[in-house]
Image: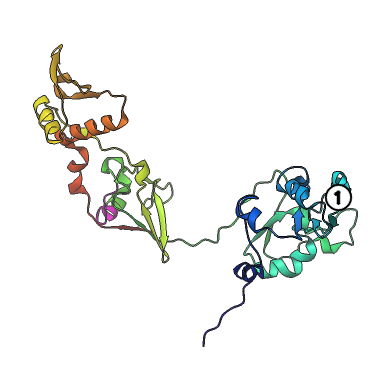
Amino acid sequence: MVNIPEEPFKHGLASRNGRLKVYDNIYGDFCRQMRTPCVIFTGHPSLRIGNAVHFLEMWGNDSKNALIMTDPDYPIQNVYGPYEKLSIRAFFFPIETRLDFSQLNPSILPDLAPKLLVMPEVYTQPPPNSSQRTDFVVAYNARATFRYGDTFTIPSTTKTKRVRLHPDTAFMKAEYLEMNETRLLEKASSLLTLRSIELRGHYDHGDIGLSSLKGILSVYDNILELNPDMNSKIRNVCVGKLSAEAFAQTLGKMNLKYSRSEINGNDTLKASVCIKNGGFRTVISSSNRENRQLLSKAVAICLKNVARQKEHFVKKKKLVIE
């Protein structure tokens, strides 16, 4: 036996049966499929601008069509003046979407059952000129009130969660740690070495370390994991001495044509790559971003990557943070 629940809104069934159709604009398929008589639901702004003006021009001369004003703040007698001579029938049926106390106390608050309701203090007592109107009072026990200019603390009911930290998210440097954080360092090193984290001790608890992390929080099957943000990944830093011969060989392997010349003792390439300071400084100049990235890649191949020197500090496993 299969239970098929009823749809919460009746217009879903009408849409599947072709009785209700939705259009993105008033031309194209709408013009070909439109049938009369029609009913226009509109508010005050649409009677001056927008698609309702177009509908009134098309259907205004037929008394079978109807216009229904729904905005409670603009009665139809105040905005329908320019269209009173049209044959279309006009009605005012306001749709009020705002809440009042008669809906809040008996139905909304019991259904939502918030753990804490924060509201202005004025809602805890009747109006000054109508002390008998107790129906204007929000009746809820778990509440916190405030007044204009007050500062108060809202108690947190959130429990701590365990978050898995991806190895590439951070790298913790030992020189940033204070002497009183030795226990924390030993605990963290046994799990994972974090990248670029300046870990500071808590002022009250020496066993607690605090630091800021940047990444993308992934929540799947109730498991939280902090992954690195690939869009904001910092470019690797390279060190070493760049040799013009090695760089030329690399360009040849990458099938890049070049012409080599020497200016003022500096080996340069016609591809706007200048090697200075005995190979310890490289300047890449090009108006094309792709060319600059391609040349940077060639330089990186010839040099040592700083990240490679730190590989022995990193253990490829995940750190669980409480």
Quarter of the image holding residue 257?
top left
Magenta-colored stretch includes residue 168 = no
Q: Image check: 304 left or right of 223?
A: left
Q: In this view, does 49 lie above or below 268?
A: below
Residue at left offset 62%, top offset 64%: 115
Position in image of residue 93 (x %, y %): 82, 59
Quarter of the image holding residue 111?
bottom right
Position in image of residue 147 (x %, y %): 73, 48
Q: In this view, does 180 lie above or below 224?
A: above
Farthest residue, direction bottom:
1
Farthest residue, direction top:
264
Q: How many marks?
A: 1
The amino acid on which the numbered mark 1 sits, given as a three-letter code, is Leu
Farthest residue, direction front:
32
Range of residues picked out in magenta: 186-194
Position in image of residue 261 (x %, y %): 13, 17
Front-most of residues 204 and 40: 40
Residue at left offset 43%, top offset 49%: 204
Q: In this view, does 210 lie above or below 125?
A: above
Residue at left offset 31%, top offset 28%: 288
Front-most of residues 25 and 246: 25
Q: Name the residue under label 1.
A: 86
